[in-house]
Image (cartoon, grey):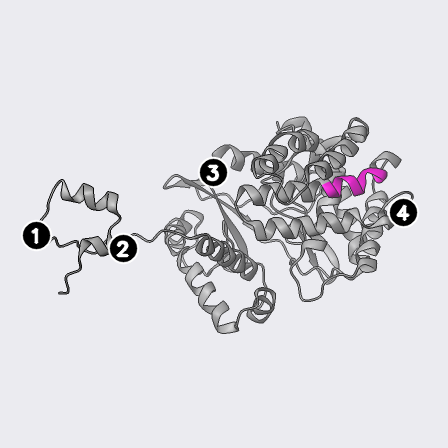
Amino acid sequence: MKYVNANEVLPAELLAAVQKCYQGGYLYIPKGNACEVKQKTDYKIELEKRNQYIYLKHLEGRTNRQLANIYHLSEPSIRRIIAKERAGYQKMKGIIEQILPLWGMENRQLEQIYPSAWEVNHSYVLKVYDDKKQLERNIKILTILSGCNIPVAEIVPAKTGEKYVECQNAYFFMTKKLPGSNDFDMKDEKMAWKMGCAIARLHMAFRECEKEVEFWDNSLLKEMKGWVRDNLSNHDWQIVDEAEYERTVESLERVYDFLPKQLIHRDVHSGNFLFSEGNFTGYIDFDLSQKNIRIFDICYFLTGLLAEETEEVLTKSEWLANVKAVVAGYESISKLSEKEKAAIPCVMECIEILFVAYFIGMEDTKQADAAYDVFRLIQNCTELQGCYF
C-alpha cells in the first residue's frame, strides 16, 4: 500500500481537524461506498423517464423500428429497454394470475396493453386501480352510458356477482374487450370528422351521467391562474415568458364565462376512442372525466395531433384540415356557439402552457420544451383566428 502525506491531499482546515484526533502516525482511510449507494444524476433520471415513455409507446402498438426512429436509438437498444421495463411489471402479473379464477378463468393468456391494464385471452381487459372510489365511479359511468346505447366496454362480474375484486390493496375490474384499435390515420379528414362526431355523442350522453354521479367540478381558468402559474413562476419562467402567459390567460378570462360547461372525457386521444376499418367502435378510460368547458375535449385532441411522435408528422395545412373536420363533425351532432369556436385557439394555447407547467413540475424539461413548441405553433397560426370555422 502506498502512503501519501496528508499535507498533499487534505485542505488545511480538514487536516487541522484530523490532527486534533490523531497525528504523528499512519492513518488508513478506507474507500467510501459510492459504488453501493448510487446517486441519481439528472441524466439518469431523464433516461429512466425516456425508457418509461418508450415502454408505454410499445404497449400502444409502436414497432421497435418506429421507436428507434423516434428516440434515435438502435433496434437492439429498444428491445433491451422494453425487456427491462417489462420485468418491472412481473409482480403484478403474478397477482393477476392468482385472482383470475375468481372470474372462472383457469386457462388464460395475459398481455399488458397499458401500465394499469391487461388483456386476458384476447377477449377481456382487466384494469387495476388503487383508488376504490374512482373505480366505483367509473363502473357507474359505464352503466349509464351503456343504457344510453353508447358503445362502452361491458362489465364482467366475478363469480360472486361483485363487479370488482380487491387483492393486496388493489382493485381489479374486468370488462369485455371492445372491437377496434387506436389505429387512427391522422391525415384522413373523414376520420377526423368521425372523431368530432364521437366526441359530440359522448358529450350528449355525459349529461345523463351528471344527473346520477357526482364529478369533480374543475375549471381550466382556475388551473391556469393556480397551479400552472405557480409552477411556471417557481421555475423562474424559464420556458414560457410571464408576459406571454399573462396575455394568454387574459384572453381566456375574457370569454370563459360564455363557454358552456359540462362533464367531459378530459383525455381524448386516439388511444381512448377506438376505430375498426374506418368505423368508430367505442370509448374507453374515464379516469380523468370531470366537469369543465366542453370545447376542452376538442382542443385537447387537436393539440395532441401536433404532439404525436410519429414518423409521418402532419403538415400545417393537414393539421388545419383536421381542425376544420373535427369541428364540423362535432357540429353535425351538437352545435357550438360562435364564442366557443372563436375561443378554440386560445384554449389550445392554454392546454399547451398547462403541459409546460406539468412537465416542469416533473423536472422533464425535454417534454416541457416540446409542449412550448406546440404552443408557439398554434400562437403563430393566423389561419386559426377569426372566422376560420
**CA separation in Å, label 1 and label 2:** 30 Å
Badge 1 amino acid: Gly
- Residue 243 sits in quarter: top right
Q: Earlier in the sequence, mark 3 or mark 1?
A: 1
In the rendering, at what x and y percent does residue 264 appear?
A: 69, 37
Mark 2 lies on residue: 36
Q: Which mark is residue 25?
A: 1
Instruction: From the viewer's side, name the closer residue of 228 and 343.
Output: 228
Is 116 on the left or on the right of 253, as rendered? Answer: left
The alpha-carbon separation of the residues under discs 4 and 3 comes to 51 Å
4 and 1 marks in contact (CB < 8 Å): no
Query: Where is the N terminus found, in terms of image quarters?
Result: bottom left
Residue 250 visible in the current orientation: yes
Picture residue at 48% right of the left edge, 70% below the top = 77
Circle 4: is it few (<14), some (14-19), or many (20+) Cα within 10 Å?
few
The tag on residue 83 is none
Identify the disc placed on residue 162: 3
* Label 2 SS: loop
Residue denoted by label 4: 388
Looking at the picture, which amino acid does disc 3 mark?
A: Glu
The verdict on residue 343 being magenta is: yes
Q: Residues within 10 Å of mark 1 (few under 14, many from 20)?
A: few
Query: CA separation, marks 2 and 4?
Result: 61 Å
Which of the marked residues, 2 or 4, is nearer the chain's N terminus? 2
Q: Which residues are magenta?
A: 341-349
Task: Find out whether residue 105 is within the magenta segment.
Answer: no
Q: Main secondary structure of the magenta part?
A: helix
